[in-house]
Image: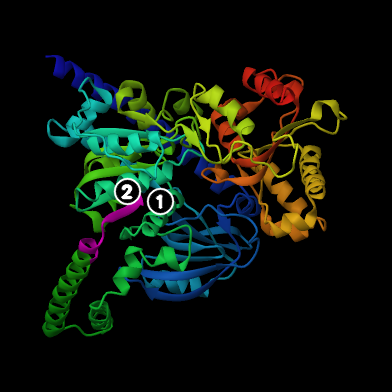
Amino acid sequence: MCYLRSMNNSILELQKLQTLLHMEHDFEREQFMEQSNKMSVQRKIKRGICWWPIRTGRSFYNSLNQLTIEIYRTEDDEIESVFEFGKAVSFFTITDKGTEYFKFTSTVSYVDDDRMVAVIPDSGAVLTLENAQNVGVQLYFDESTYHLMFEALNKVMQAKSGRLADLREIFHGNSKAEHLTFDHIRFPWLNAAQELAVNEVLRAKDVAIVHGPPGTGKTTTLVEAIYETLRRESQVLVCAQSNMAVDWISEKLVDHGISVLRIGNPTRVNDKMLSFTYERKFESHPDYPQLWAVRKAIRELYSQKKKGDSTHQKISRLKERATELEIRINEQLFADAKVIASTLTSTANRVLTGRKFSTLFIDEAAQALEPACWIAIRKAGRVILAGDHQQLPPTVKCYEAEKQGLSHTLMEQIVARRPETVTMLTTQYRMNEEIMRFSSNWFYQGKVESAKEVKFRSILDLDRPMMWIDTSSLPEDEYREQFVGESFGRINKAEAQLTLQTLKDYFAKIGKQRVLDERLDVGVISPYKVQVQYMRQLVKKSADLKPFRHLITLNTVDGFQGQERDIILISLVRANDDGQIGFLRDLRRMNVAMTRARMKLIILGNAATLSHHPFYKKLYEYIQNL
């Protein structure tokens, strides 16, 4: 009876989650339709969701026998686009009558700076693109990811028994998480908390969580845990929410001597990354030239105008041969790999159909929507999550869905319900002690400590590691925020200019030659996209900063997740009489921004506005008292 009650409760929780996901789906679809109908092409380009005009390159069949076409962006290549592997796109042309959309849609197969390869439906689509004028490509509302999440949730709720039902009851019901018992294994190259985390991963029969605050060596610990797991299992599945996060962990595994098969398109495009993708390995297999010849023969037979019985028989025999070769190559690739790496949604890729794994590792689990996690969990016997729920949350666009809990992740759920499964890493190797201390006290109950080798790291002797430049003491009419609208939000031009002047002054204080010789790198962060874009323009126009451009990265908080720099400057933008700070209330974003800095952190913001919130008041006081 207790089990049935528990099962009913867990299913009710998942039904609520499904309802919230429907709200997010409907909201995002409505937003997309509004963008498509009302937003100008130039505004879409600035938002990174559109390239126009484009030119087409060659069309070809890829290793998966999909017809693809190369597309090149010809303007505005400074703007970062949001196109990535697996995203749906649509094509349009601009005529005297306005914007006309072509009837077919495509999927991004590969993207790198100003070049994209898109999978298209047929040769007719190729001709349409090649013959049209003023062609552009834009992001299309992608139903497929939502379909996968809804399907996964349905499967989890419908599971009456088996591993999926067990995990559902551990995560959402009253079932206990079980673990093995064995003597503690020593790993002298890890610190005590990291060593304990690896041991807890190996002991877990159902679930374990590696909680890694900023700079505590989460990736190092996770790679070691995967390596040790592979001494006991033949193969594991390693996932993350984003392609970039999958690339990062994959690269570290390869450096550790572990064979990785990467499903999907790497974001970090270089020869090292490409060499372990499924497509590149498929193409380099000894049987691939034969398969390519068979596929070519099939296409040629299809293109013949007269088709008799003999032609049909030839096509049928060739298709059987192609299938046989595909299966042989596929099995060889999976047999050779110790780690299968992909995004959570890409675990639904057809090449993974029917495959099961004893262990699933989910990196950056605190950034993943729970329904996306279940897509991968369906393939696993046990689940290891790594991340930090005090850093960036998943992106949820519907305010009501977020308010009701859609952004509450599976990792947070398990941390709250099953604290015995969590091991927190407690020694950080990135930041000066004074930069780290505020974050440790506010977010981690003061449990994070600095390693001896970084405790007093600094660029200049007697330099203050943290500074807050208070713009409320400057001319009020100049240092005011302005509302830009849409998802761009706010801009504060005077504060942007002051941010870059502060950087120039600090470079002069260090010594410009020393900055170049020691390659001191800088991150300039703002929570608001339009502020970042404005500062990028200023840097581009600045003669003083020209020699240092290769050392300076400007991005939003989200764009800096997982990164670090010697010097960080944060422009907080908000400056008003009402103490309104918008989404700066999500303190996890500020935690990420502050903890990117190794040696110097400079915050620029209106203390009078921001101090209405207790976090910023306390932070301002902390910095003033250093």
Numbered disc 2: secondary structure:
strand
User: Whole-percent x and y of residue 296?
Assistant: 28, 81
Queried whether the magenta region covers residue 335, the answer comes back as: yes
Mark 2 touching mark 1, by CB under 8 A?
Answer: yes
Three-letter code for the amino acid on which mark 2 is drawn: Val
Camera-side residue: 134 or 62? Answer: 62
Above or below, comparing residue 463 to residue 405 in the picture: below
Q: Which residue carries the number 2 mark?
A: 238
Visible residue check, residue 66? no
**In this picture, residue 404 sits left or right of residue 610:** left
Please count the marks in the image.
2
The structure residue drawn at horizontal position 88% and vertical position 30%, both measured from the top left corner, is 475
**In this picture, residue 346 sits left or right of residue 468:** left
Camera-side residue: 317 or 267? Answer: 267
Label 2: few (<14), some (14–19) or many (≥20) C-alpha neighbours in 10 Å: many
Answer with the quarter of the image where residue 87 lies: bottom left
Answer with the quarter of the image where residue 419 lies: top left
Q: Which mark is residue 249?
A: 1
Three-letter code for the amino acid on which mark 1 is drawn: Ile
The N terminus appears in which quarter of the rendering? top left
Coloring basis for residues: rainbow
